[in-house]
Amino acid sequence: MSETDTVDGTDQRVTTTGETSERVREAWSDYEFAGDAKLVVDDLDVYYGDERALQGVSLDVPDESVTALIGPSGCGKSTFLRCLNRMNDRIDSARVEGSVTLDGEEVYSDGVNLVELRKRIGMVFQEPNPFPKSIRDNISYGPRKHGDLDTGLLARLLGRDDTDDEEALVERVLRRAALWDEVKDRLDDNALGLSGGQQQRLCIARALAVDPDVILMDEPASALDPIATAKIEDLIEELAEDYTVVVVTHNMQQAARISDQTAVFLTGGELVEYGDTDQIFENPESQRVEDYITGKFG
Amino acid sequence: MSNATRNRIDGADSTAGDLLSRGVLATSVVVFFAAWTLLLQWVDETAAVGGVSALKLLGVGLVVVGVGLVVVGVGSRLGYVDTAPSKTAGVPVGVVFGLLWAAVGGLLGTLALGNAAVLWLPVAALFGLAGFLASVLPREDVGATVPGAVVLLLLGGFVAAGGVNAGWTWAPAWSSAVFPGSELVPILVVFATLLGAWCAGKANEGFGAEGRQAGAYYLVGAVVFAMLGVLALLVGFIVTNGLATMLTRASLAGGELTVPLVGVELPWPEFPFLTNPTGGLFVEVPGVLPAIIGTLWLVFGAVLFAVPLGIGAAVFLTEYAERGRLTQVVEVATNGLWSTPSIVFGLFGLAFLVPRISGGNAIFVGQLVLGFMLLPLVLITSREAILAVPDAHRDASAALGVTKWQTIRSVVLPAAMPGTITGVILGVGRIAGETAPLLLVFGGPPYPSTTPNVLGSFELTAQPPFVTNEALLSPASALPYQLYATITAGVFPKEIFTDTQFGWGTALVLLLVVVGLYAVGVGSRLYFRRKLHHE
């Protein structure tokens, strides 16, 4: 997303391949998939100040599947991801135009309750970022703040505390994140004492604890070693049974391994091609995507 | 790079040179400490050790160091000692030695030609230039040792030959100050041995980059030692002077504690100086209890006032306000406020707060004024601490749908707690010992016979402000205030202590109170750190 990355290459390619890219766009715009669309993105533009980071991206994300976003650095894939749960609101210079709907509800309308939106669209970041609290507190942080779990002193004195519910929740999401067996004996230890891979799975568990429908992951394994990466990848595939997962990755093998459909962004914040992962990697419509995937470009 | 110097990797293995430079280093260290014992008066300057006066021994020590350095340096140049010197000792060494030689030249010039700058200044400049060139021009092993060693030899030789003895004084014509030899010599020797240790440290590692690294190590070590020495001297002085007063008639089991309800009396430690009021008719040992309580109330009130306000302002400035002109102005203003002299705060309290709140000196006004003084530091440090909390925590919290304020309360502030507490500790250390504003807005009779009863004086009233507290609106005594009064007024009412004795006792208690407050602060900081990190 740095300014220098987006400028070079793009203009020249757009002009030389403008006509073909138009044809390709028509081909994949009709991408059909079985099941319902969970997220529908329509003509999304993002500007950082004067610079345009996303150019008219339209994309339907199917329910209960893994969608991978790939592309070179600075192509806008992380920006796109952060638009889905409106994390770009936190950047003062960012301006978003276009439409995103979650189950038919507009995300970018004025009356949207960000708390409810982000409860339904969870997010996992590139660097594992657990809070400097105990493992248990990390998990129950979200539900406690939303008032779904009350383990405060007053509730405990009144005998109305949800300690049992909390125990159950912590065990359930930690099992779901394949972390339970490793940490069940030290739930009260500080989460910063875990290894990088464990911390990232804890972050996934923390996101699951608020019971989202969609989980966004921004290069979740790029800071991890190969073994930890493999665990995260397995986990992502499992999560897709119940959740809609959107993963940004710069690792094409990873995208090929874990995703059901793949969107390829190229420099300039342009969505070049979107389709079944197998088709994108074996037989892409666009010459630029083929160049990127075979390593000639990017 | 074809003519780059190449030395053996396994250099400086000559045992003789190694032993010699180590001997020089050890001698420097010994003489350094010996000079300190003289300076601190642990050894009298007229004392004789083995029939030779202590001052002369220092001189001999310097001569030994000087000769050793010359031998090592010249030996290395002639190839008897295996070293890896650079081509030159470098300009910094040249400047140091040049300045030393300029000082020597200035002294000699004044002695020979009299006290006119026109006459001695050129001599000093000439000597300085010579010293500089003698250090810079030869190879490092000579340049970094010999010019310094000769200065040591001159000084040591002069002292050892009896040019200076304990009764000698130096009264330079350009100043009215008189320097007695008993103090001047140890001070000069301390610095001379530092110089010797620096050179010997270099020589010990065979000069070159490694030698400079070793020399710097010894210099920095000596500076740390000197700093700790000054601190220890200060604290030791207060303790030795105040301890006798503080422990007057103290005993570990002399007192009696009556257990409530049962009525059994148990032996109990007794510290009359800490537990007695200062004035009063029937007090045998006047104590500082009212002042201790006064100081604690002041600190407590100031912290209670400044910490919530300071943290609140810091949260607003870092989390809510947009970074820009406003935050910059506030930043500059708080920095300025922190360095404002305390007497100015006192004057403000006297002119503005006193007429509006109490109509006279009062604990409450003292608390407010000290709170104003504490506020900027709390603001600055908690701002820094909040800024240091990684944005990743805020992002993670926001992505869970948690609101900004909840994030601040549950994630940002706990993570910023240790830093904030550090600021409060520093500030409390300052305000607990603050005297000037207390003179204006707080102090009552310096030797009170009762302690301020703040807790017991709260009363509800029907009219505004509905709660009154007579004790908070009355003047009281605090430790630094009482110390000031004792020393300046000098009319301490009891014969058991002199003014000075009582003053030292008060100073020691003040020191202990501040250390106690520090301990509380450091303890709570540790507690929060433990919670934040896996330890």
Image: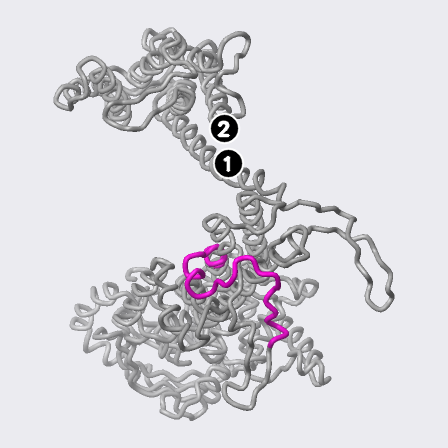
Give me the chain letter of mark 1: B
B267 up-or-down from B299: above or below: above
Q: Is residue B386 visible?
A: no
Residue A253 painted magenta: no
Q: Could you tell me which residue is drawn at 57 percent across and 54 percent down?
A: B513
Callout 2: helix, strand or loop?
Answer: loop
Badge 1 is on which residue?
B233
Callout 1: helix, strand or loop?
Answer: helix
Q: Tell me which segment is drawn in magenta.
A: B428-457
Q: Give, as a three-letter code, the residue at label 1.
A: Leu
Q: How many residues crowd around disc 2 within 10 Å: few (fewer than 14), some, or many (20 or more)?
A: few
In the rendered view of the protein, which quadrant contains the C terminus of chain A? bottom left
Distance of mark 1 from mark 2, alpha carbons?
A: 9 Å
Badge 2 is on which residue?
B40
B391 up-or-down from A160: above or below: above
Nearer the observer, A67 or A290: A67
Instruction: Residue B535: give x, y in percent of width and height.
Output: 61, 54
Badge 1 vs badge 2, beta-carbon distance below 8 Å: yes
Nearer the observer, B82 or B360: B360
Instruction: Residue B411: give x, y in percent of width and height.
Output: 51, 70
* Relative horizontal placement of residue A260, taking residue B321 as reference (left or right): right
Q: Give, as a three-letter code, the residue at label 2.
A: Leu
B11 up-or-down from A113: above or below: above
Nearer the observer, B19 or B367: B367
